[in-house]
Image (cartoon, rainbow, N blue to C red):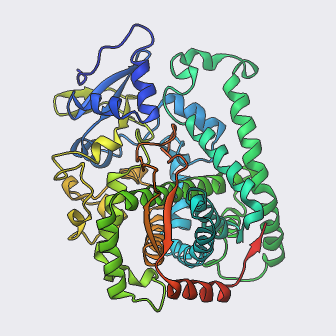
């Protein structure tokens, strides 16, 4: 027996609801919560269990993660096109192999490389925001892109590379759309996967997207490969070197081709840059519509850091309100609607329900993060709810008590995002420095609408305009001094 849900149509199932989930429709998301902690919808003749509560999500995706960490069969086909993508990899040998690689690069020690580049790239972002505050949306993209590029390849893109950055984010938006259930026709008619490859149009789409992505990475990787071959016989420490170099050393002798290396680095770049950018865009809008929270955070930063220096990662333990504000932005303004679907590897029992092997489990992220059982007044933006929560995102995600978890942006269980430590560093550095440097307000005559987001895997905010003003000449002078001192990395 499965949980209840809206009645499906013959053959096509709940197609309109699935489109609503993929587009992040608040109406669809709220409608599904009427059926309780879990609702059943149908993709053609296959059930999808939509998880609406943090309790059910924790019990199914965390406590039972050894049995619920697979991907659906139709995602397996996507994984064949991107076999070195951790996000799409079926639960099994390849998944464990990839997770080991990502954890080596992005573990607590490896993630510290993000600190240097995050702190440096904020200076370039501030200079651009001061010159063109109406371009804040794009400056978040460029900031996140450059931080991640410097970590992976040791290069950054100046203003002359703006179009390349825009093209890359557009590529990711298109590519990530196809990760969602119901986004391709074979999700409804799996028998179409038996057609010859030349009769499968989605194959042409994926190959075209992969060619474009390969073009971005190839020249940078070739440069790193040249350096690697030159220094192969030297005992150079791995720590602190670009991720591409570390990956070449890790996989030396493993018979892994160049395309596999590119696929791993592509996922690092795309998942890292796009999520950090989405968060920063949502953060700016959230501060514009919640000015009291911004002022409270600035007061804390002023009392701890002062006006004579920029905040840095070492200030993290001494800024509990800022940490709480970041958690609340994650919760109140999520940049994902339906998470990437999980699938069961065997029959499981949950309460009175028997969930068959291969059943799709889809977390309803906005509803989970506005659950009244977990959060008091969940529609209100209130960082104070997290003031006594000193845990980082990874520690919170592993808390055995579901009611103590802060937010669910980084997933659950064995599918927890391996970049969680890096994301915490990048976001804290950028948020504290933006609040230290700028006052953020709505642009006169323009309403700030949190719901204005794109469709797709990530609900990326649409371009917006805000009034972003320097907090004073003294702050500008310190930023200028730091920018002058910073070594300019390779530019494209």
Residue drawn at x 40%, y 60% is 288
- Position of residue 424 relative to residue 52, above or below, is below
- Give percent across and percent down for residue 489: 73, 77
Q: Looking at the rendering, which quadrant does residue 220 occupy? A: bottom right
Seen in the image, is 259 located left or right of residue 139?
A: right
- Image quadrant holding the C terminus, namely bottom right
Residue drawn at x 31%, y 80% is 300
- Position of residue 139 relative to residue 411, above or below, is below
- Give percent across and percent down for residue 446: 46, 50
Query: Is residue 395 in view from this perspective?
Result: no
Q: Nearer the viewer, residue 487 or 202?
A: 487
- Image quadrant holding the N terminus, namely top left
Q: How many marks?
A: 0
Seen in the image, is 160 located left or right of residue 145?
A: right
Q: Nearer the viewer, residue 467 or 191?
A: 467
- Position of residue 306 relative to residue 205, above or below, is below
Q: Nearer the viewer, residue 13 or 75?
A: 13
- Give percent across and percent down for residue 478: 55, 88
Q: Looking at the rendering, which quadrant does residue 41 occupy? A: top left
Seen in the image, is 441 located left or right of residue 464?
A: left
């Amino acid at each position: 027996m499965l949980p209840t849900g809206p009645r499906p149509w013959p053959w096509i199932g709940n197609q309109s609801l699935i489109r609503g989930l993929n587009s992040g429709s608040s109406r669809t998301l709220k409608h599904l919560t009427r059926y309780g902690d879990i609702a059943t919808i149908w993709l053609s003749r296959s059930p999808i269990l939509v998880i609406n509560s943090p309790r059910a999500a924790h019990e199914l995706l965390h406590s039972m993660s050894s049995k619920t960490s697979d991907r659906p069969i139709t995602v397996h086909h996507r994984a064949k096109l991107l076999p070195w993508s951790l996000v799409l990899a079926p639960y099994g040998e390849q998944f464990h192999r990839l997770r080991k690689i990502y954890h080596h690069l992005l573990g607590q020690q490896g993630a510290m490389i993000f600190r240097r580049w995050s702190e440096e790239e904020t200076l370039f972002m501030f200079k651009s925001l001061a010159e063109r505050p109406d371009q804040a949306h794009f400056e978040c993209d460029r900031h996140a892109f450059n931080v991640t590029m410097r970590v992976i390849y040791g290069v950054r893109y100046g203003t002359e590379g703006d179009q390349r950055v825009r093209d890359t984010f557009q590529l990711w938006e298109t590519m990530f759309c196809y990760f969602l259930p119901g986004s391709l026709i074979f999700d409804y008619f799996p028998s179409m996967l038996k057609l010859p490859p030349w009769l499968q149009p989605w194959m042409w789409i994926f190959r075209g997207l992969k060619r474009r992505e390969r073009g971005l990475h190839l020249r940078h990787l070739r440069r790193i490969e040249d350096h690697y071959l030159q220094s192969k016989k030297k005992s150079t420490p791995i720590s602190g070197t670009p991720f591409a170099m570390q990956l070449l050393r890790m996989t030396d002798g493993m018979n892994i081709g160049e395309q596999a290396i590119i696929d791993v680095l592509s996922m690092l770049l795309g998942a890292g840059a796009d999520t950090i950018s989405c968060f920063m865009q949502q953060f700016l809008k959230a501060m514009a519509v919640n000015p009291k929270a911004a002022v409270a955070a600035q007061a804390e930063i002023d009392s701890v850091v002062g006006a004579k220096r920029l905040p840095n990662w070492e200030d993290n333990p001494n800024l509990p309100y800022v940490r709480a504000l970041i958690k609340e932005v994650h919760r109140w303004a999520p940049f994902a609607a339906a998470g990437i679907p999980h699938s069961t590897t065997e029959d499981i029992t949950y309460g009175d329900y028997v969930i068959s092997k291969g059943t799709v489990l889809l977390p309803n992220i906005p509803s989970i993060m506005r659950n009244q059982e977990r959060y008091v007044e969940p529609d209100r933006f209130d960082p104070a709810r997290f003031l006594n929560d000193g845990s980082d995102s990874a520690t919170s995600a592993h808390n055995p008590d579901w009611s103590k978890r802060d937010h669910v942006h980084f997933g659950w269980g064995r599918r927890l995002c391996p970049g969680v430590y890096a994301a915490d560093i990048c976001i804290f550095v950028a948020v504290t420095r933006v609040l230290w440097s700028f006052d953020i307000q709505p642009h006169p005559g323009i309403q700030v609408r949190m719901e204005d987001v794109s469709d797709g895997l990530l609900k990326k905010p649409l371009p917006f305009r805000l009034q972003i003003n320097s907090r004073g000449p003294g702050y500008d002078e310190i930023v200028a001094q730091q920018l002058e001192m910073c070594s300019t990395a390779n530019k494209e």
